[in-house]
Amino acid sequence: MKVIINVSLKEGVLDPEGQAIKSSLNNLGFEHCSDVRTGKQIILNLDQKSETEVIKQAKKMCEELLVNTVIENYEINILKD
Amino acid sequence: MIVAIRKITGKTPIKIWHKEYDIPNLDLIVIPGGFTFGDYLRCGALAARSPVITSIKNHIGRGGTVLGVCNGFQILIEAKILPGSLIRNKKLLFTCRETTLEVQSCIENPFLSGLKIGECLKIPVAHNEGNYFAPEDLLKQLKEEGRIALKYIKQKDNEENYNPNGSTEDIAGILSKNGKVLGMMPHPERAMNYLHGGTDGLKFLTNCVEQIIG
């Protein structure tokens, strides 16, 4: 089963990369772009049949390694074929 | 770092491989700077899950002393040995230059206790992710517990870029609750002689060694 994990910075955590992208977008004429936040996407393949088990495993992975919960939020989605 | 410690102690420190579980009783473990596992995912994140970290946690559990410098600090944070987070430098630039640090009034610890509170040390930084971030409540707790050890400080009133990475409250280094673990972004081993541009790193590390080993 394919799992997509979206990791984003928590509200209030400085995102200098997002700020730099925003400033470039504004310079290109997209002056209505008032904020940019960056994040990352991790795509995993888990050899499991049960959706509940997959979510449980992915959550454990996020808490143990994939996400720094001090500054990041995450969202787990199962990719349906 | 090995050269620096050898210069001070006259003895060669032992190197510990990241896959080692069994480490002997040691006076001081130093996790030096550099890069680990390409610093993929987050700086220090993969190194912090190496087998050796369990041994380092056991060493700390026995009251052992640990100094983490730069990537070593990032690893201590990722291993949750020290709290908070080290994020991308505010200006998105890898910063490699001298900074001035001020010794803070903090809990008793073997790293700074031979130095005076308010004393300044000129020690260089070299990093891309050294911007210390802590949520409000953690910051409050660190202050109350006297765990902020080193801060970047202005040399002149109008100096703007004294903080090289935009860290919260100019924090450069923090201590564990028991004061036996120090994580710092600046590299003392890069200020060991006049060819480096200064010797405050030598002063800092000599003090650490004297306090810990005697």
Image (cartoon, coloured by chain):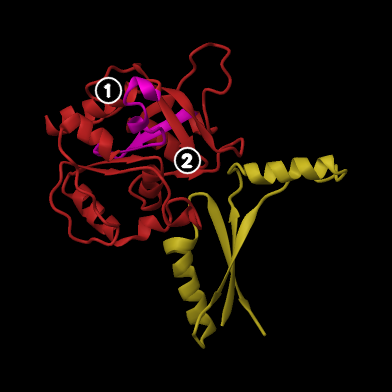
Chain colours: A yellow, B red
Q: Does A19 lie within the magenta span?
A: no
In the image, residue B45 sits, relative to residue B206, either above or below, namely below
Q: Relative to the observer, which residue lies in front, A74 or B40?
A: B40
Look at the picture and state if A50 lies above or below B5.
below
Horizontal side of residue B8 vs B101, given as left or right? left
**Does A73 sit above or below residue B187?**
below
SS assignment at label 2: loop
Q: Nearer the viewer, residue B1 or A38?
A: B1
Tell me the amino acid under the disc marked 2: Ala
At x 40%, y 32%, the residue is B186
- Residue B59 x %, y %: 19, 50
For residue B113, above or below residue B68: above
Please give left or right for residue B181 compared with residue A67 in the image: left
Chain containing the residue with disc 2: B
Q: Name the residue tied to disc 1.
A: B203
Is B190 contained in the magenta span? yes
Q: Which SS class for mark 1? A: helix
| Residue located 83% across and 40% down the image | A27
Residue A68 seen anywhere in this rendered image of the structure? no
Residue B134 image label: 2
Q: Amino acid at mark 1?
A: Lys
Quadrant of the image occupied by residue B176: top left
Magenta stretch in the rendered image: B170-196
Across and down, in percent, residue B152 comes to 45, 25
The mark that comes first in sequence, 2 or 1, is: 2
Side of B56 where B212 appears, left or right:
left
Residue B13: x %, y % from top left? 19, 43
